[in-house]
Amino acid sequence: MIMIKNGNYNIIELEEVESTNTYAKDIAKDGAKHGTVIIADKQSAGKGRLGRSFTSPAGKGIFMSIVLRPDIEADVASRLTLVAAVAVRRAIKKVCGLETGIKWPNDIVADGKKVCGILTEMATELEKVKYVILGIGVNVLNESFEEELSNVATSIYMLTGKKYDKELFVQEILSEFTICYDKFIEIKDLTGIKQDYDACLVNIHKTVKVINGNTVFEGICRGIGNEGELLVETGKGVQKIISGEVSVRGVYGYV
Ligand code: BTN
């Protein structure tokens, strides 16, 4: 295990781990400080949202989790996932000039496929947050994906034809996240990033399908509200979609 000091963050690098989120959760339970970052070269059981897995082959991506201890309520903390999406998107743009979009709530997409996924988990006590684990997975150097993922996943290399140093992304993600996080903690809603978020929301003003268990409906995506909810206009007015277990996609395919 290598320990590096990086500004506000304590970075712990691991060669292989089941999931950096699970590892971060374990050390957070034991008192790991705000700003502890776990980075692994490979995950054997990388986790995605909605119980899905996240493919994490050795050396190909950034698999990192940040332990945060904000003094906020649980429902406010769930907005952090959108804050992170904006920060990662800005970091990608800075490192390689690539314009990416956001698929609500927090997938970073390009060419109609996912290049980064974010998984936020938290522990609470009496509605207050004890800790938040912000897990970020970026496909950086993958040359291809197995057949069942090839329609939905892409990598920085596949998009740009260049093999960027993963370290550059980590540094930029942490510095952009710090800027977005500090602003968010000050105002506790998303007014600071809403404009930026909506500008790169892939489905804005398009028809989306909202899937919540057996309930499925369609409407026009109108951007996010200040609390991170997706605003979807239907015949019955504007519906506020809260992240949770809901999946929102375009009517054609993944994005
Ligand atoms: C998603 O696409 O649904 C979210 C994917 C989140 C993947 C990252 S990789 C680092 C961290 N550890 C995990 O097990 N998952 C997150």
Image (cartoon, helix red, strand yellow):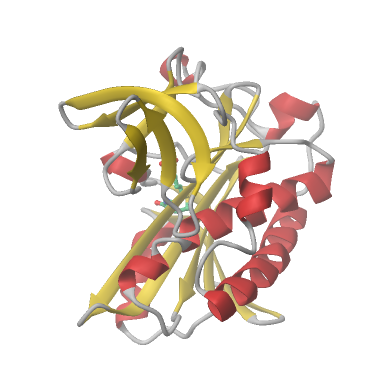
Whether residue 215 sits left or right of residue 147 in the image: it is left
Q: Position of residue 145 (x, y in %)?
A: 53, 22
- Residue drawn at x 79%, y 28% as measured from the top left: 160
Q: Position of residue 239 (x, y in %)?
A: 34, 39
- Residue drawn at x 70%, y 70% as measured from the top left: 179
- Asked whether 128 or 95 is in front, the reply is 128
What is the quadrant of residue 233 in the picture? top left
Q: Position of residue 40 (x, y in %)?
A: 52, 57
In the depicted structure, whether residue 38 falls above or below residue 111 = below
Whether residue 119 sits left or right of residue 3 in the image: it is left
In the depicted structure, whether residue 45 falls above or below residue 234 = below
Whether residue 189 sits left or right of residue 127 in the image: it is right
What is the quadrant of residue 140 in the picture? top right
Q: Residue furthest left?
A: 214
In the depicted structure, whether residue 127 falls above or below residue 106 = below
- Asked whether 118 or 160 is in front, the reply is 118
In the depicted structure, whether residue 169 falls above or below residue 236 = below
Observer able to see residue 59:
no
- Residue drawn at x 73%, y 31% as measured from the top left: 157
Q: Position of residue 190 (x, y in %)?
A: 55, 62
- Residue drawn at x 30%, y 30% as measured from the top left: 236
